[in-house]
Amino acid sequence: MAADAVALRVVPTPKFTDEFAQRLRRDLEKFMGPAVTVVIEPVDHIPLEPSGKRLIIKPLRAAEGPGSPE
């Protein structure tokens, strides 16, 4: 993923719709600024870190992107 991009990984509930995902993307892009691209990535689960914690914000390696294994 590019340095000017953010992936928001979400474990969707039945109420999670495409419209809601697009609203999340727009709001986050507005917050981050026009130079940042936001990708909403639905996932089945968000794994715990080796510490046992689930990070809210996690920097990604340059080679890692949407769909990349953790």
Image (spheres, rainbow, N blue to C red):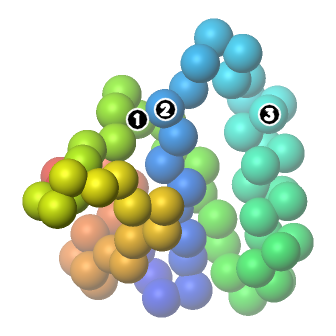
Q: Are marks 2 and 3 in contact (CB under 8 Å)?
A: no
Helix, strand or loop at label 1? It is loop
**Please, what is the three-letter code of the amino acid marked with disc 2?**
Val
Name above or below for residue 67 compared with residue 20.
Answer: below
Mark 3 or mark 1: name the one nearer the start of the chain. Answer: 3
In the picture provided, is 58 more to the left or to the right than 17?
A: left
In the picture provided, is 9 more to the left or to the right than 4?
A: left
Disc 3 target residue = 20
Disc 1 target residue = 43
Q: Residue furthest left?
A: 50
Name above or below for residue 64 compared with residue 69.
Answer: below
The residue located at (39%, 71%) in the rendering is 58
Residue 22 percent across, percent down from the top left: 78, 43
Q: Are marks 1 and 2 in contact (CB under 8 Å)?
A: yes
Between 9 and 67, the residue placed more toward the observer is 9
**Please, what is the three-letter code of the amino acid marked with disc 1?**
Val
Distance from the alpha carbon under mark 3 to that under mark 1: 15 Å
Crowd tier of the residue under label 1, counting other residues whose Cα lies within 10 Å: few below 14, some 14–19, many 20 or above: few
Disc 2 target residue = 11
The residue located at (31%, 49%) in the rendering is 67
The residue located at (76%, 79%) in the rendering is 32
Between 69 and 58, the residue placed more toward the observer is 58
